[in-house]
C-alpha cells in the first residue's frame, strides 16, 4: 500500500477519523503507534512514520496507544474493493483461518506457496501472515481480558496463542503491559453475566444509516434464526468451533455487540462476520461522494447518508436465500424459507427423540434461543416433502449443497469472486442474477449492479433513470466502483 507522507500527516494533524484503519501513525520519540484520529498532540514530522497495518507497526518495535486503541479501529475498506490475493488473504486472516489452519492452510486456500504469500503480504502490509494473525490474537486477548473474568490461561488459548508464555510475551510487547495490568485497568467494570458472554464495541466510519440496515434485515428475518427488536438485531451464528448468538445495537460512533459463544476461540471470526454483515469497514464518505456526482442520486444521498450494503455471516445461508428468492417477492421467499426451516426442525426433533442423551425437541446446535441457519449437510438430509417448492428449485438447492460439501464451490468471504461466480453459474438452476447477488452480499463485492432485478428497475424509473437492463448498465458506469451501494439505493427508491 503506497502512502503519501504529506496526505497522511494532514489526516493526523486534523484528527480525521475517516482514515482510521487505512494506516497507522508510528511516533518514534515515544515508541507508540496510533490511529490517525488520536486526540493526543500531533507529533513532529521528524518523529513520524506511517504503517499500512498494526502488525507492521508492532514489527517496528512500537506499542499500541492506550488512549486511542488503534488495534480496535475499523478495518481498511480496501479489502472490499480489492479482489486480489492480498485482499482475499486479509479477509481470511480476519476470519481466523491462520489460527485454525496455520499459514499452510491459508496459502492452500489462496493457491500460492507460503513463501510467495509472505512476500506479497510483506510488500503490501509491511508484515507477513503470521505477524498479521498475531496482531489479531493480541486484540482478541485484550477484548477477553477486559470483558470477561476468565483465567489468563483460558484467555491465552481462546485467543489462539500456542502457550501462556507466548501470550504473556506478545501482550507485553504490543501493549507494554502485563495481561494482569490490562485487567486491573478495567477498574470496577463488571464482565457480562453468563459463561461465554462478551460485550464489545464495533467501530465504524460515520455516517451510518442504521435504520436502513435494520429495515432491510427485519423484513427478511427468519423466526428462530434472527429477529429485529427494539432497535437491536439478534441472530444465531454457526461458527468454526461451535455455535453462538449475537445482539447488535447501532449507536453513535459504534455498534454495541453482545456475543454468547459456545467456544471462545470463535470470538475473532464472530466479530469479523458481524462487521461484514453490517458493512462496518466501508468508507461512506468516499462512496457517497462518488454517487452524489449523479444528480439523480444526489437527493437520496443528502436525505440518507451512509447507506451500507447488508452482507452475510454465512455464505451457504445467503446462497439458499438467493436461490429461493429468484423471481419471487421478498415476502414469498421468506415464507418458503420458514417452511424449509420448519421441515429441518421436524427432522431434528425426530432425531432428538431417538437420542437418549438429549431432551426431546432440543436442537443439536443450540439449547434455546436463536440458532444458526441449516448447513449444507442438513439441507441434503431433508426429504422431498420438506422443501415446499418446485422440483427445479429443490434440485438447484441440493446441487448447491452437494457442491459445497465436496468443495467444488467455496462460499467463504475470502473466495476469488470471479471464480466463485463462474462456478455458481455452472450449477443447474443458478443464473447470473443469483450469482451476482451472492457476489454483492456474500462475497462483499462493492461494484455489483443487479440491472435485471425488477425492484432495481422500478427504483431507477422512480428516480428518472434508464430502466431497461442494457441502458441501465451503460448509465451505471459512472457509479463505479460502488455500484452495489447504488443497487441498495435503487431498492429503497422502489
Image: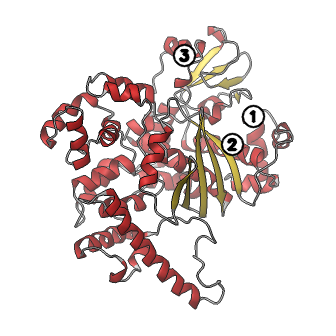
> Label 3, label 1: how many angstroms apart (C-alpha)?
24 Å
- Give the label on residue 392, or none: none
**Residue 412: percent from the left, percent from the top?**
43, 55
The residue identified by callout 3 is 11
> Label 1, label 2: how many angstroms apart (C-alpha)?
9 Å
Q: Nearer the viewer, residue 128 or 385?
A: 385
**Residue 261: percent from the left, percent from the top?**
65, 60
> In front: mark 2 or mark 3?
3
Residue 162 appears in the picture as rendered = no
Q: Quadrant of the C terminus?
A: top left
Q: Secondary structure at mark 1?
A: helix
The local crowd at label 3, few if under 14, some if 14 to 19, many if 20 or more residues have their Cα within 10 Å, is some
Mark positioned earlier in the residue sequence (2 or 3) = 3
Mark positioned earlier in the residue sequence (3 or 1) = 3
Look at 51% across and 28% down and name the residue there. 22
The local crowd at label 2, few if under 14, some if 14 to 19, many if 20 or more residues have their Cα within 10 Å, is many
Mark positioned earlier in the residue sequence (1 or 2) = 2
The residue identified by callout 2 is 138
Q: Is residue 179 left or right of residue 2?
A: right
The residue identified by callout 1 is 175
Look at 56% across and 23% down and name the residue there. 17
Q: Is residue 16 left or right of residue 433?
A: right
Look at 35% across and 68% down and name the residue there. 336
Q: How many marks?
A: 3
Look at 63% across and 70% down and name the residue there. 368
Q: Is there CB contact under 8 Å for labels 1 and 2?
A: yes
Q: Is residue 111 left or right of residue 469?
A: right
**Residue 463: percent from the left, percent from the top?**
24, 33
Q: Is there CB contact under 8 Å for labels 2 and 3?
A: no
> Label 2, label 3: how many angstroms apart (C-alpha)?
26 Å
Amino acid at each position: 500500500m503506497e502512502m503519501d507522507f504529506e496526505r497522511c500527516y494532514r489526516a493526523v494533524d486534523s484528527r480525521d477519523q475517516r482514515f482510521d484503519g487505512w494506516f497507522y501513525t508510528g511516533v518514534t520519540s515515544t515508541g507508540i503507534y496510533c490511529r490517525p484520529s488520536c486526540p493526543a498532540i500531533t507529533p513532529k514530522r521528524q518523529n513520524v512514520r506511517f504503517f499500512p497495518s498494526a502488525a507492521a507497526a508492532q514489527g517496528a518495535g512500537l506499542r499500541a496507544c492506550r488512549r486511542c486503541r488503534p488495534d480496535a479501529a475499523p478495518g481498511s475498506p480496501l479489502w472490499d474493493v480489492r479482489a486480489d490475493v492480498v485482499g482475499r488473504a486479509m479477509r481470511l486472516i480476519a476470519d481466523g483461518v491462520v489460527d485454525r489452519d496455520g499459514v499452510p492452510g491459508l496459502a492452500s486456500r489462496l493457491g500460492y506457496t507460503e513463501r510467495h504469500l509472505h512476500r506479497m503480504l510483506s510488500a503490501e502490509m509491511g508484515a507477513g501472515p503470521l505477524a498479521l494473525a498475531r496482531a489479531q490474537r493480541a486484540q482478541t486477548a485484550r477484548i477477553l481480558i477486559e470483558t470477561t473474568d476468565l483465567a489468563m490461561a483460558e484467555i491465552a488459548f481462546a485467543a489462539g496463542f500456542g502457550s501462556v508464555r507466548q501470550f504473556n510475551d506478545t501482550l507485553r510487547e504490543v501493549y507494554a503491559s502485563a495481561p494482569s495490568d490490562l485487567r486491573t485497568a478495567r477498574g470496577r467494570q463488571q464482565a457480562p453475566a453468563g459463561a461465554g458472554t462478551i460485550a464489545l464495541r464495533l467501530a465504524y466510519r460515520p455516517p451510518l444509516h442504521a435504520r436502513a440496515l435494520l429495515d432491510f434485515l427485519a423484513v427478511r428475518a427468519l423466526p428462530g434464526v434472527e429477529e429485529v427488536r427494539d432497535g437491536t438485531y439478534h441472530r444465531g451464528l454457526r461458527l468454526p468451533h461451535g455455535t453462538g448468538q449475537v445482539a447488535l445495537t447501532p449507536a453513535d460512533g459504534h455498534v454495541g455487540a453482545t456475543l454468547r459463544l459456545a467456544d471462545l476461540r470463535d470470538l475473532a471470526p464472530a466479530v469479523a462476520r458481524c462487521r461484514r454483515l453490517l458493512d462496518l469497514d466501508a468508507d461512506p464518505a468516499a462512496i457517497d461522494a462518488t454517487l452524489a456526482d449523479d444528480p439523480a442520486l444526489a437527493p437520496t444521498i443528502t436525505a440518507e447518508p451512509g447507506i451500507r450494503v447488508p452482507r452475510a455471516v454465512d455464505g451457504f445461508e445467503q446462497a439458499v436465500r438467493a436461490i429461493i428468492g429468484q423471481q419471487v417477492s421478498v415476502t414469498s421467499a421468506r415464507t418458503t424459507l420458514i417452511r424449509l426451516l420448519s421441515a429441518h426442525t421436524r427432522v431434528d426433533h425426530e432425531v432428538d427423540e431417538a437420542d437418549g442423551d438429549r431432551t426431546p425437541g432440543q436442537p443439536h446446535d443450540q439449547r434455546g434461543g436463536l440458532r444458526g441457519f441449516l448447513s449444507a449437510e442438513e439441507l441434503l438430509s431433508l426429504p422431498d416433502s420438506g422443501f415446499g417448492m418446485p422440483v427445479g428449485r429443490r434440485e438447484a438447492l441440493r446441487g448447491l449443497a452437494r457442491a459445497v460439501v465436496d468443495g467444488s464451490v467455496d462460499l467463504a468471504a475470502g473466495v476469488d469472486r470471479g471464480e466463485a461466480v463462474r462456478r455458481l453459474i455452472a450449477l443447474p438452476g443458478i443464473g447470473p442474477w443469483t450469482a451476482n447477488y451472492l457476489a454483492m452480499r456474500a462475497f462483499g463485492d462493492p461494484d455489483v449492479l443487479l440491472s435485471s432485478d425488477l425492484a432495481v428497475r422500478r427504483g431507477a424509473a422512480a428516480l428518472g433513470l434508464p430502466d431497461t437492463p442494457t441502458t441501465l448498465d451503460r448509465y451505471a458506469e459512472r457509479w463505479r466502483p460502488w455500484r452495489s451501494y447504488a443497487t441498495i439505493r435503487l431498492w429503497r427508491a422502489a
